[in-house]
Image: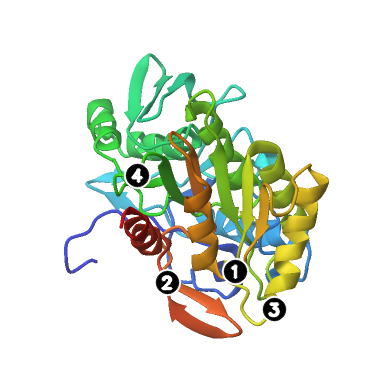
Amino acid sequence: MVKEGCTHVIVETTSEGIKQWRHAGIWYDVAVFTNLTPEHLQAHGGSFNAYREAKGMLFKSLMQHPAKIFLGKKVDRAILVNNDSSEKTYFFAFPADKKMTFGKKEHADWMAKNIQATETETSFDINEETYLLKILGEFNVVNALPAIAIASQFSIPPEKIRQGLRELTLIPGRMEKIDEGQPYTVLVDYAHEKESMTAVLNTAKTIVPPGAHILVLLGAEGGGRDKVKRPIMGTIAAEKADVVIVSNVDPYEDDPQEILEDIAIAAEMGGKIRDKNLFVIADRREGIQKALLEAKEHDIVLITGKGAEQSIVIDGIRSPWDDRDVVREELKKLKK
């Protein structure tokens, strides 16, 4: 990157990566805290506190290296925290040259107001400036806020920031629309835990036409991932979707049926009925086929869990897979 003249780098730094010291030798200038959910507890001994502390190591490291000089100016080592998170105090307490907050629920330095979401775009205001996102989902506003804050921190003009957001029309695997001329909407998304599943289903509820239905295909990972989330996701799907299809995501070496049943039983407790509006189909392609066959005109079909991932792991065997390609293939079959 240095040889190519790159001057700024944004790194998604995971707690597991930090635990394995993959970040060692990188001098971060801005540490951003977005949220904390019990997704990777097994990698941290099953302890939420250990998981949080692993993330905290990144924030702790900020002031352990000298401040950089860029274009003749000192670069402030900054902390940027989601003010809507219940964990904000922990991350905001680390030392830094500068501390900032972002959010939409409580007062923050970078606070989104007047959020207006439609089927094609979302607009919001910050300090009298209006920003427009052409990607689906009000939750993307909270993702855009730290980007706006960081760009501003590095003196990028507001109009350039607005232009950059306006021109962002696709994040692969994030509420990505698959259109093969079918009379209903199909969206592929990574959603695989409580917060993301809630967000995508809430987005679907805001754009689904009156009288139309929401269908969701979901599953959960094996391989030591958080088991507690499975029934929670089943409950959310039952509450917010009209039809629920439970299918494989990445069971790894775990028993796929056990994972599916953990979700399905919770969906049943939430009021769904098997073989009526709840279907358990282990084979993911068959699950996608079922979702598309059940969809009617103007419905919204959400294919969640894998987004733009390029493989699926079943019984320890990794095979090529892309939800978006499979959905296109199955839609084309239905047109024949």
Residue 301, image x, y percentages: 49, 45
**Pointers 1 and 2 in contact (CB under 8 A)?**
no
Which tag, 1 or 3, sits closer to the chain's start? 1
**How busy is the neighbourhood of tag 1: few (under 14 within 10 Å), some, or many (20 plus)?**
some
Q: Which residue is mark 2?
A: 321
Vertically, is 98 above or below 95?
Answer: above
| Residue beneath disc 4 | 182
Of the pair 63 and 89, the residue shown nearer to us? 89
> How far across and how far down the image is residue 330, in percent?
39, 60
Labels 1 and 4: the sequence-earlier one: 1
Residue 127 location in percent, x, y?
Answer: 41, 17
In the rendered view, would you say 228 is above or below 19? above
Q: Residue at the spot x=69%, y=48% of the render?
A: 276
The answer to whether one can see residue 308 in this image is yes
Query: How far separated are the C-alphas under marks 3 and 4?
Result: 36 Å
Badges 2 and 3: C-beta atoms under 8 Å apart? no
How crowded pointer 4 is (Cα within 10 Å; few <14, some 14-19, many 20+) is rated as some
- Residue carrying label 1: 16
Q: In front of the other: label 1 or label 4?
A: 4
Q: Which mark is residue 254?
A: 3
Mark nearest the camera among 1 and 3 is 3
- Residue at the image position 52 percent from the left and 23 percent from the top: 210
The amino acid marked with disc number 4 is Gln
Q: Residue furthest top?
A: 128
